[in-house]
Image (spheres, rainbow, N blue to C red):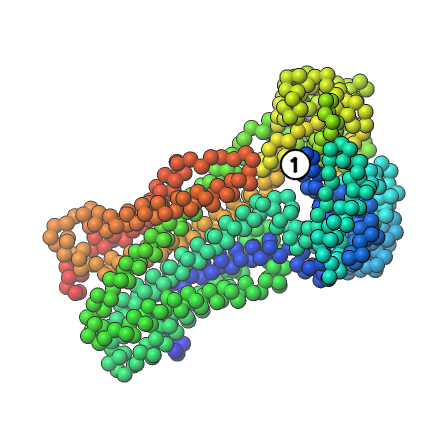
Amino acid sequence: MKISKFFRYLERDKTFSMINICGLATGLTAILYISLYIWQETHYDNFHKDIDNLYRVSIAYIQNGNELGAFPTFVDPLAPAMKAEIPEIEAATRISSARSHNVSFDDQALNVEHVCFADTGFLEMFNFPLLVGNMTTALTAPYSIVITDKLAEKFFDRDDPMGKLLKLDGNDLYTVTGVVKTPPANTQFKFDALVSFSTLYRLPNVYMGWNGGNQYIALARLNSHASVDAVTEKTNQILYENLGAVAAIHGFEIIGSLQAIRDVHLHYDSGSETLRTNLSIFSAVAFLILIVAGINFVNMTAARSLRRIKEAGVRKILGANRSNLVMLFLGESLLVCFVAFMLAMLFFKLFEGIYIRLAGVTIGETVSSGGIIFGGVIALAALIGIIAGSYPAIRLSSLPLVDAAKGGGKQKNNKYRMQNILIVLQFAISVCLIVCTLVVSNQLSFIKSKDTGVDREGIINLSIRGNEHHELLKSRLEILPEVVAVSASNDMPVYGFSGNGYMPEGMENVMMINLLSTDEHFLDVYGIKLKEGRFFRDGEADLMTLVINESLAKILGWDGDALGKYISRGGRHEVIGVVHDFNYEPLHNEIAPLIIANRSDDDDFGTLSIKYNTGNTAALIGKINDVWMEVCPEMVFDYGFFDDACISVYQTEQRFQLLFFSFAFIAIVLAVLGMLTLMAYTIEQRRKEISIRKVMGASIFDVLQLLLRKTALQILIANIIACPVAWWFAQKWLENFAFRIQIGWTTFVLALFISAFIALAAIAYQTIKAATENPVKNLVAE
């Protein structure tokens, strides 16, 4: 087919061609973005050369047959013991959980969020390119630090960072021994700097060994012939010999398992269940967009072909055989799809920045490893082109000359029945997406407005981890007139707290309970209500006392009788109060048992919380900054608002909402566009009928009622089909939240009204336009 003829084919109906091409291009662009997002999330850490043999150790705590929790962090000796005692392990290494630290060079200081302690072999086991330095020795000596290229640029610009001294938390100096490329987005290992693991054995107040802190991730590379089950069994033997035997005395089991690094993000990370649900929903949305875009293209191509029945007859008379006509119509359809695909590539580039902001991923990294996606989209476009071109190619080329001269005879009836089915399917898809959109919006609104038992407004949080002057800082801030109360704690009540083993009075076994370490003003700052007893007071007397939450009191059978009871860990601690339950971690989780300790031996304050009562927050922050610079000028002034932290913890859900809304909107617009175009063609076919009815006395309302009756039935059928499907998808998504809304009947009624309004408004426009035309014009034309 000559290109000039193809463009003449497009110019015959410019509006139709533009709608057809742009609609398909928009659908292909959305499918491409969704596919890239799914690829990104399902291909974490696949760039490591030994990915098939890399594993992370997870430790589960079991009591009376019930798993209390499974965590990737454990004590530091596990990885070296596994390497020494398990022959199937080629290499083992450790990395600590990431923590924020104040890092300074000369007079420049930064709060670096992700600082990890890592073994010498970490960079050799995983493919994070070392741009400067020796991979074998960079993390060997104590007080060595490897920084990312982005952090190196912030501190040293273009100067050579090697050998420079960085100070952490205003204390020790660390020598820069390497620069590593910043980890890509699709990795579970997020770090800005790696500190040599050997440093931990030199630091004060850091508990190492089998009785140390659970802060370290054990990583292993197995040989290609190793049995994962056999290695797991040997790992558990190591655990039993060193800790399990003692834990068994207290009724605990400590069980290890190996998790493939390639599966961690999708199956084992916190929030992985929600992620899998989101990916399933996005896959469904991509499929629905494909169906809608495909239906539109096929329907509109088929509708347009009605105009070409006589053309097919003329071509036959002029000598064209069936194969010539098949090649003509298929070629036209495939060329239109190719143009749509090229336009989709343009859209993809134009909206790349918006997608990156919505999805929080870097397209360049995904595209480099996911080129197969583009090939898949090309194949989809070609498939749609073949399906769309099949009707005119096969039907019209097989029509006898007599039927072709009459406009196709009865051939159109079957086509209209199929067209009606496809329209109902489009309506159903739109309704399904509208219902899901309403549910997602309502759930996130519920999260923002739910009473969690904690005041969210009027609180500023300062990062004080490693700050030795926080007591002086606290006392100086308390005298500011705008400040109501100031409290230091190990963290904010939003991300959750780590747990320890405790022995409550009357129990024979140790119980894992979350711990909040704070001072006497915590309740004043966060507005948490005391149920019974009292909270901490100034003085040494309360250093060995505890306050618990309602959930713990109920589990222990102490509800209404907790005061005076004892909980043991490093001594006997008397319970002096019970607080009402409050959500101290995301609403995905139920409220877990909690102990609140007053500067316990596990104390590691990281947050200073300031309750204020002024509307001029900018002036208050300026005053706080002034106090900070007087007390600890060597530390980074890093602050945030508690209400922002409460919202940011649902960042995954917020991104899901924005992406889902965007793609759902595209699908709905495509469906409406398809209905509008098809109705235009349907009305064009019935213009003579409409004109005759008007001549016979029918009003505009009569004509409108005639044409809308069938559409209303289609909308009703679509809602009956779509609502159960939408309910199932929405319910699966809501199951990721311990605190969630109930899907009421009003959601489905609202979806019915929205879908009916959109469809009927679009169709009514075309109908009224046709009904108000001069009937004589149409009758004369016939």
Characterize the local packing of mark 1: few (<14), some (14-19) or many (20 or more) Cα atoms within 10 angstroms: few
- The quadrant of the image that shows the C terminus is bottom left
Q: For mark 1, give the secondary structure.
A: strand
- Quarter residue 61 falls in: top right
Q: Is residue 281 above or below residue 602?
A: below
Residue 668 placement, left or right of 620: left
Identify which residue is drawn at 14% across, 53% down: 693
Q: Is residue 641 above or below residue 128?
A: above
The x, y position of residue 549, in whole percent, is 66, 25
Identify which residue is drawn at 56% across, 43% down: 653
> Which is more toward the observer, 623 or 759?
759
The x, y position of residue 177, in whole percent, is 84, 55
Amino acid of disc 1: Asn
> Which is more toward the observer, 729 or 525?
729
- Quarter residue 330 falls in: bottom left
Q: Is residue 24 visible?
A: yes
Q: Is residue 466 visible?
A: no
Residue 496 placement, left or right of 380: right
- Quarter residue 70 falls in: top right
- The residue lying furthest to the bottom in this view is 319
Q: Is residue 606 above or below residue 318?
A: above
Q: Is residue 155 above or below residue 489?
A: below
Identify which residue is drawn at 14% across, 56% down: 692
The x, y position of residue 516, in whole percent, is 71, 30
Identify which residue is drawn at 70% across, 47% down: 257
- The quadrant of the image that shows the N terminus is bottom left
The x, y position of residue 507, in whole percent, is 72, 25
- The residue lying furthest to the left in this view is 696
Count the numbered circles shown.
Answer: 1
Q: Which residue is mark 1?
A: 66
